[in-house]
Amino acid sequence: MDNPRRASSVPTLSAGPFREEAAAPSHRFVDDYLPALLAQASQLISSEFHRVARQHGFSVSEWRVMASLAGGQAISIGALAQVTVTKQPTVTRLLDRMEARGQIERLPHDSDRRVTLVRITPQGTQAVEHLMELAREHELRVLEPFGLERAEELKRTLRHIIALHAHAAGEAVEEDE
């Protein structure tokens, strides 16, 4: 694929209903409130890619689980719920379906019988590989206007915010819809 902009059906930056509104000055509290800005940015950017995930046969929740497990070590269901921003019972039901399809496997914890670990299978990795390539291309398009240095600084800052506040997360909360 010579031109990543043609690699998927994800809209470019010029598309979208918020373009005009973003340019207009505003005095709303949420326009300068970090949690609101993070949530809005996440929703807009994620929804662009979620259309692509659905076109490739994954629900949004399945994509989040697969992307969270891909390339990593086995993690607990609780940790998976937190990183996917999904309630633990929902994750457990998803894992049941994904395990039946051979995409993930559950493993016992070495020292705590109450904890079940989850990892992606080779079949699951193969199923999600192309979608991860499309996700990387989408990320590049999103970050391109900022340049590599600013993009990496943004990611470092977000990882630091997550690390500082992960202890307070408690049970993962699903967004109200």
Image (tube, rainbow, N blue to C red):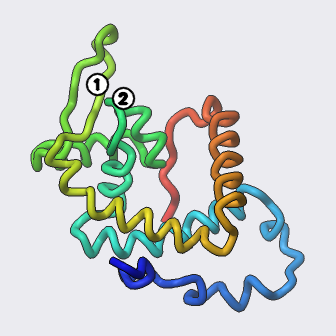
Q: Of marks 2 and 1, which one's residue comes earlier in the chain? A: 2
As drawn, 11 above or below 78: below
Quarter holding the N terminus is bottom left
The residue to which callout 1 is attached is 116
- Left or right: where 56 falls relative to 32: left
The residue to which callout 2 is attached is 76
> Which residue appears at 71% of the width and 62% of the height?
36
Q: Residue furthest top?
A: 111
Between residue 19 and residue 88, name the one nearer to us. 19
Indicate the position of residue 25 as horizontal and vertical percent values.
86, 84
Indicate the position of residue 29 as horizontal and vertical percent values.
84, 67
Secondary structure beneath disc 2? strand
Secondary structure beneath disc 1? strand
> Which residue appears at 29% of the width and 71% of the height?
54
Between residue 82 and residue 127, name the one nearer to us. 127
- Left or right: where 76 falls relative to 140: left
Query: Label 1 is placed on what type of residue?
Result: Thr
Query: Label 2 is placed on what type of residue?
Result: Ser
> Which residue appears at 34% of the width and 48% of the height?
65
As drawn, 54 above or below 71: below
Q: Are the residues flagged by discs 2 and 1 in contact, CB closer than 8 Å?
A: yes
